[in-house]
Amino acid sequence: GMLEEEDFRRMRDLVAKGAMETEIKLAADEIRGRLNPHPAGQIELNVPRLDGEVVAGIQHKYQETVLFFPSQGQTCHAYCSYCFRWAQFIGDTDLKFASREAGQLVRYVRDNPQVSSVLITGGDPMVMKTPVLRRYIEPLLTAKLPNLHSIRIGTKALAYWPYRFTEGEDADDFLRLIGEVKAAGKHFALMAHSSHSRELEPEVARRAVGRVLNAGAVIRCQAPLIRKVNDNANVWAQLWRRQVQLGMVPYYMFVERDTGARAYFEVPLVRAYKVFTEAYSQVAGLCRTV
């Protein structure tokens, strides 16, 4: 199951006996604390500083890439049970990355010339309306940041809510924003979470992909290897073929991280390697970008 058997029984028994909400929450918080909410010490080791002060809502884990967590984007259209960022969603401000300060982001990128890419992440930033996204992206365009080459947004909206890109003035405004990023000389990439080719079968999903690409963005696709969902080489080969057919770029296959209630979904590394290599052997070169 999702939890260790002992933890599951504990929560089940509390609910069955009608325990007080405070008692249930106390038990849940204790279990969560043992699930490694911030693996690899990221809440201490990857948080940058400006003028000696911690910069909230930013991670700088990779030399050229800064992760930015806008406060309004720390929810999702739906929640993946295996999410390695589950600590963003449990109401504990001590564990949550979030910021409303675009100015601090600009200053940090300016002060760190090795940074060439900003990844706006969450949660899912595409839950935000485009005017809110603009508050974070436009300052990156108007500031003189010659070191900044690309802006990325991580999202599962193409699968969960493709209408975000197809319906209404806000969808059109987002496409205009992509054009403005391109006009400023920056690369714009939508980092799409796509776990199975069936997510790309609906006509509206295909239309959303086409609109984003026609606006000038590149869509790079990533997904975890999930037991009983896509732990099969044929599934991955079909997914990569479908993505390339639609003009998307296969980018990453993830394995589970040492965090959260992951036991039900995890796949042994030796099996993950087998799935990957067998899928790779089935596809043409354009799919071999993972």
Image (spheres, rainbow, N blue to C red):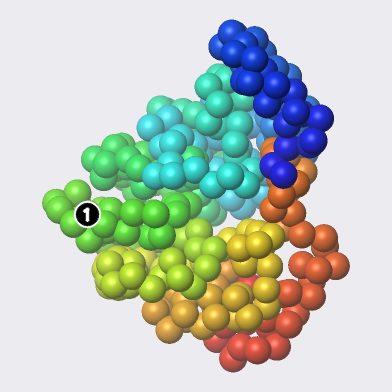
Tell me if 88 is positioned left or right of 159 in this view: right
Residue 283 at x, y = what percent?
A: 61, 88
Q: Residue 3: give x, y in percent of width and height.
A: 73, 37
The residue that appears at 79% across and 75% down in the rendered structure is 274
Quarter of the image with the C terminus in it: bottom right
Left or right side of 213 for 34:
right
Q: Residue at x 22, y 61 (%)?
A: 166
- Going 46% across and 35% down the picture, which residue do you hit? 74
The quarter of the rendered structure image containing the N terminus is top right
Q: Would residue 244 be found to the left or right of residue 41 on screen?
A: left
Q: Which residue is mark 1?
A: 171
Residue 101 vertical position relative to residue 155 in the rendered view, above or below = above
Q: Give residue 203's position: percent from left, percent from top.
A: 29, 72
Taking the view exactly as shown, the residue that stands out farthest to the front is 17
Number of callouts in the render? 1
Residue 254: horizontal and vertical position, in percent? 67, 60
Q: Which residue is painted at 34% across and 54% down in the image?
A: 161
Q: In this view, which residue lies farthest toward the right? A: 270
Determine the secondary structure under disc 1. Answer: helix
Question: In the displayed structure, would residue 9 be above or below residue 263?
Answer: above
Image quadrant of residue 88? top right
- Any part of residue 139 in sight: no
Q: What's the amino acid at mark 1?
A: Ala
Q: Looking at the picture, does residue 268 appear above or below residue 120?
A: below
Residue closer to the observer: 136 or 252: 252
